[in-house]
Image: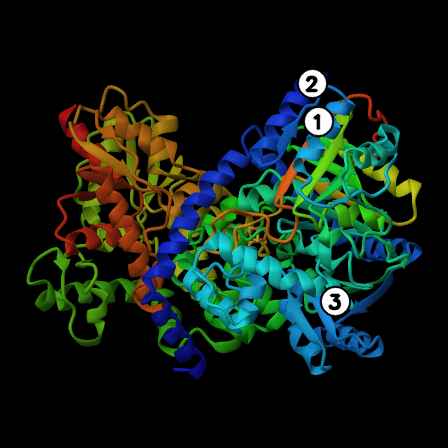
């Protein structure tokens, strides 16, 4: 599959499971989109592509209250959590987050909204294609917490009716932005 | 009757008296199949499941080495691994940990292994509180129940009941709206993660290559329970071991698709070692649970059950499960796999009633992503149970003394044909039976035993045929022989027209399935020998059948029963290779095109379980019916069991059989057809009896009878 097809397949699959795709033209527009979604404090863990983008300064400049640091106390009170994405799987619309650092897990789990920044260059076909990368993560570090995220949190435990947002995020926004990073091992 | 049996029967009756539950499970079954089909679009399910089965079989062989590899890698990553031989060992280890670390609150994400060992009880004995955080698990924890489904634990409950439970919890009146209730759970459980000192999870996979585990979930509670508390305990059945990350991906490709019809669940979490937690390293304990799995691995006949990836599909498609639910058709683990796991993890006694509750339709086998022959294993357990508890005095006498003695068996049947006269009043069906047998005819008429069995009339059937293309021996089976002899006449008529001579080896006896399915293997094996001898005698080109259950016996069971006997094994193989059901014979080897005259009739087709899922035949009879000019309309759930199941509908579970039949009759009538065709005299007995009882206008026939009608016109 070529890059355009991968992106299209990914977007279709992610939308099919209830994620929303946002495609800002550049970083400024991206910041604006995040501001629209930030109805309260924002949990912002540290990750390389976010730092490269100058997220912290940019969002603070827009007057957004940022929660940083270990996030154990903060993330539950955040309206929104922002993370990067290491790479994504087109077939299932899945985001792969190397979330060994605890703040990445907290920001993508506790707030009701999760915004994930993804460079479209880092979309690969599927589960099977992901395995070698998974292995590299395991070789790189002695401990790992890797997360595949496919759409928002969901349950069908009451009368088998699909309901979105039980314990994890109720809304998942995937912000496709070029030039973030082209290394799948880096978030 | 044993107290155990009595209590079980009461539970069956109670479940059958809950139409709301049945309706929910039926709807779920329908929706599930659609979602599943969609999820597997573009994938070759047979290939995927063959790969999973093969991988799991390798794991079984190398389990010792893989386990060591897993432990070494997990420990190198900072985990502590404990091998628990029994449920008690696992409970003790975890309870000790709770005490030693002064844990007051444990948050749990869904784990069937923890249900299996009753871990919550062990935790609460220490004085700590165990809080289930999976929505379904929390609901049943509040209700003080156990799961009725492996993937959807509270599938048996309705929103009103949930609202009541939640209201008690919050002290407010919570409206019975699903979205609201989910929000209540979110708010109520949130604090739990933040306060808990320990999180307990299960695992869907334990990867030897990395020493890590993977959790496949949707709600996000497992992510929270494995992140926030400082201690993480993962309770992992040893059957969850896979060698590599590629093997893990293989399981992931089928598990969500087959469990819930999802391409992938919302979350897959890969956790290896003591990951950071609040600035320190997390305390991670992995409890590897045996609890009967080792014994299962040692059992030749049952070990395939260890391939199970706990997708729950075998329950979703099971007509018995849909009729009575998982609290009746299960112990802790439910459905077909539940029967087997219960026998090994909780004891044969706990599984005894369940083993008999399987109707043998093989619907589960066709959807199992690990390609487990669930029905075959359950049958074996029934035999084991027959050895342990006996087959039942009356039954075993019949099997040993009567069935094995063909002359006596047939004399008895002939006598019965005369004795039944007062109840049949000379008709071909029995609408009422006297006294305690009455319950069998209250919901379906029964056919009378024919005045003369086919074996007595066969020689007189004229066979006008010059130089036959083939000579086939007809294996009639008891129903065809003694109840529906006219079916044999139809068969001769059609096959003769197609250039085939039919013989009837008189020494043929019952195929042995009733004995085998009741757990009397010895009688079944004796019958196998008698039939192999009788049917191969004239060296026919084929042995042709009209009953797919007999077909399975001749093709599969005889081979298995005689395989260790050098005098018989090769002959059983020969018989197996020559056996064919009549629809496939005509479709594959003969040209019925010019012979079948047009009949204007709207017909629907019922797939017999053993024909479709046993012999793989379902297109052939449909093609023949269409060749005969009939208009074929498909009923809904054409391949769902009709509820006959031989002695299942007569003695072991007539109430469930009746419920399953009702579903079938409904689908037949909804199809708009005026005739329902099938290729099994057992299904015919059940369906024709049900239709007659309803005074339905739809007629039920064996395909061969319908073809004989067409031949008459051709
Ligand atoms: S036996 Fe097969 S169908 Fe049943 S739960 Fe296990 S894997 Fe799924």
> Pointer 1 and pointer 2: residues touching (CB < 8 Å)?
yes
Protein chain holding label 2: A
Q: Which mark is residue B564?
A: none
> In the displayed structure, would residue A128 be above or below residue B147?
above
Callout 2 and callout 3 share a chain = no
Residue B526: where, in percent of width, then height?
45, 62
Residue marked by disc 1: A125
Residue B328: where, in percent of width, then height?
45, 68
Tell me which residue sits at (24%, 19%) in the image.
B594
Q: Depth check: B518 or A2 in front?
A: A2
Residue marked by disc 2: A1
CA distance for labels 1 and 2 = 8 Å
- Earlier along the polypeptide chain: callout 1 or callout 2? 2
Mark nearer the viewer, 1 or 3: 3
Q: How many marks?
A: 3
Residue B429 lies left or right of residue B487; in this view the side is left
CA distance for labels 2 and 3 = 47 Å
Residue B577 lies left or right of residue B701; in this view the side is right
> Pointer 2 and pointer 3: residues touching (CB < 8 Å)?
no
Protein chain holding label 1: A
Mark nearer the viewer, 2 or 3: 3
Residue A64: where, in percent of width, then height?
76, 39
**Residue B518 quadrant:** bottom left
Question: Within 10 Å of the Cα at label 1, are there few (<14), some (14-19), or many (20+) other Cα atoms?
Answer: many
Quarter of the figure that contains the N terminus of chain B: bottom left
Q: Depth check: B120 or B546 in front?
A: B120
Secondary element at tag 2? loop
CA distance for labels 1 and 3 = 40 Å
Residue marked by disc 3: B195
Residue B640: where, in percent of width, then height?
37, 47
> In the displayed structure, would residue A56 be above or below residue B287?
above
């Amino acid at each position: 599959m070529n890059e355009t097809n991968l992106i299209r397949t990914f977007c279709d699959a992610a939308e099919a499971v209830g994620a929303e795709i946002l495609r800002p033209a550049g970083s400024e527009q991206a910041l604006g989109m995040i501001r629209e979604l930030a109805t309260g404090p924002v949990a912002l863990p540290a990750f390389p592509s976010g730092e490269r983008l100058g997220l912290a300064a940019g969002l603070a400049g827009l007057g957004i209250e940022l929660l940083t640091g270990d996030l154990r106390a903060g993330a539950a009170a955040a309206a929104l959590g922002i993370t990067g994405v290491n790479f994504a799987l087109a077939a299932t619309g899945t985001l792969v987050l190397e979330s060994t650092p605890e703040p990445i897990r907290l920001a993508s789990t506790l707030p009701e909204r999760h915004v994930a920044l993804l460079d479209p260059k880092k979309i690969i076909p599927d589960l099977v294609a992901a395995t070698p990368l998974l292995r590299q993560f395991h070789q790189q570090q002695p401990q790992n917490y890797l997360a595949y995220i496919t759409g928002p949190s969901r349950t069908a435990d009451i009368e088998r009716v699909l309901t979105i947002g039980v314990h994890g995020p109720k809304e998942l926004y995937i912000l496709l932005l070029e030039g973030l990073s082209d290394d799948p091992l880096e978030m | 009757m044993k107290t155990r049996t009595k209590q079980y029967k009461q539970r069956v009756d109670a479940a059958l008296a809950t139409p709301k539950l049945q309706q929910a499970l039926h709807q779920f079954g329908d929706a599930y199949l659609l979602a599943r089909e969609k999820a597997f679009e573009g994938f070759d399910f047979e290939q995927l499941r063959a790969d999973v089965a093969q991988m799991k079989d390798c794991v079984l062989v190398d389990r010792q080495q893989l386990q060591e590899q897993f432990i070494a890698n997990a420990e190198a990553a900072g985990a502590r691994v404990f091998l628990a031989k029994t449920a008690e060992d696992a409970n003790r280890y975890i309870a000790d940990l709770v005490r030693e670390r002064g844990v007051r609150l444990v948050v749990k994400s869904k784990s069937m292994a923890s249900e299996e060992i009753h871990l919550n009880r062990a935790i609460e004995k220490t004085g700590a509180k165990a809080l289930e955080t999976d929505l379904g698990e929390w609901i049943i924890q509040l209700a003080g129940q156990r799961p009725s489904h492996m993937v959807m634990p509270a599938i048996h409950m309705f929103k009103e009941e949930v609202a009541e439970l939640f209201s008690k919890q919050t002290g407010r009146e919570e409206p019975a709206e699903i979205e609201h209730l989910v929000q209540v759970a979110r708010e109520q459980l949130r604090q739990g993660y933040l306060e808990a000192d320990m999180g307990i999870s299960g695992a869907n996979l334990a990867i030897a290559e990395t020493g890590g585990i993977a959790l496949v979930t949707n709600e996000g509670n497992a992510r929270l329970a494995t992140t926030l508390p400082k201690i993480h305990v993962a309770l992992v059945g040893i059957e969850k071991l896979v060698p590599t990350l590629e093997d893990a991906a293989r399981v992931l490709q089928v598990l969500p698709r087959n469990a819930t019809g999802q391409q992938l669940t919302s979350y897959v979490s890969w956790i290896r070692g003591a990951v950071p937690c609040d600035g320190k390293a997390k305390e991670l304990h992995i409890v590897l649970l045996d609890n009967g799995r080792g014994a299962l691995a040692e059992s030749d006949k049952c070990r395939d059950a260890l391939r199970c990836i706990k997708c729950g599909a075998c329950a979703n498609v099971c007509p018995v499960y849909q009729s009575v639910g998982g609290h009746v058709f299960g112990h802790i683990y439910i459905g077909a796999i539940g029967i087997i796991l219960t026998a090994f993890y909780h004891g044969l006694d706990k599984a005894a009633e369940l083993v008999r509750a399987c109707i043998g339709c093989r619907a589960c086998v066709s959807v199992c992503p690990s390609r487990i022959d669930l029905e075959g294993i359950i049958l074996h357990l029934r035999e084991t149970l027959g050895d342990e508890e006996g087959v039942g005095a009356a039954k075993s006498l019949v099997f040993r003394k009567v069935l094995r003695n063909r002359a006596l068996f047939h004399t008895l049947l002939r006598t019965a044909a005369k004795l039944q006269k007062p109840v049949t009043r000379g008709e071909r069906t029995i609408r009422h039976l006297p006294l305690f047998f009455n319950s069998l005819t209250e919901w379906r008429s029964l056919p009378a035993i024919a005045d003369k069995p086919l074996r007595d009339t066969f020689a007189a059937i004229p066979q006008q045929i010059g130089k036959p293309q083939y000579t086939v021996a007809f294996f009639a089976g008891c129903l065809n022989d003694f109840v529906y002899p006219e079916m044999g006449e139809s068969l001769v008529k059609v096959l003769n027209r197609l250039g085939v001579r039919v013989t009837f080896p008189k020494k043929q006896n019952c195929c042995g399935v009733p004995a085998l399915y009741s757990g009397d293997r010895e009688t079944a094996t004796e019958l196998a020998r008698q039939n192999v001898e009788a049917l191969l005698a004239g060296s026919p080109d084929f042995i042709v059948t009209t009953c797919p259950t007999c077909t399975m016996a001749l093709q599969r069971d005889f081979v298995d029963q005689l395989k260790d006997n050098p005098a018989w094994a090769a002959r059983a193989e020969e018989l197996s290779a020559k056996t064919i059901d009549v629809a496939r014979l005509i479709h594959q080897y003969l040209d019925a095109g010019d012979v079948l005259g047009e009949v204007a009739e709207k017909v629907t087709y019922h797939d017999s379980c053993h024909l479709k899922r046993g012999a793989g035949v379902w297109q052939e009879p449909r093609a023949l019916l269409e060749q005969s000019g009939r208009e074929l309309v498909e009923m809904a759930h054409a391949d769902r069991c009709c509820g006959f199941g031989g002695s299942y509908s007569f003695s072991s579970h007539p109430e469930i059989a009746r419920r399953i039949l009702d579903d079938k009759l409904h689908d037949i009538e909804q199809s708009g057809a005026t005739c329902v065709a099938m290729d099994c005299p057992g299904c015919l007995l059940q369906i024709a009896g049900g239709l007659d009882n309803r005074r339905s206008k739809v007629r039920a026939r064996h395909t061969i009878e319908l073809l004989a009608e067409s031949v008459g016109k051709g």
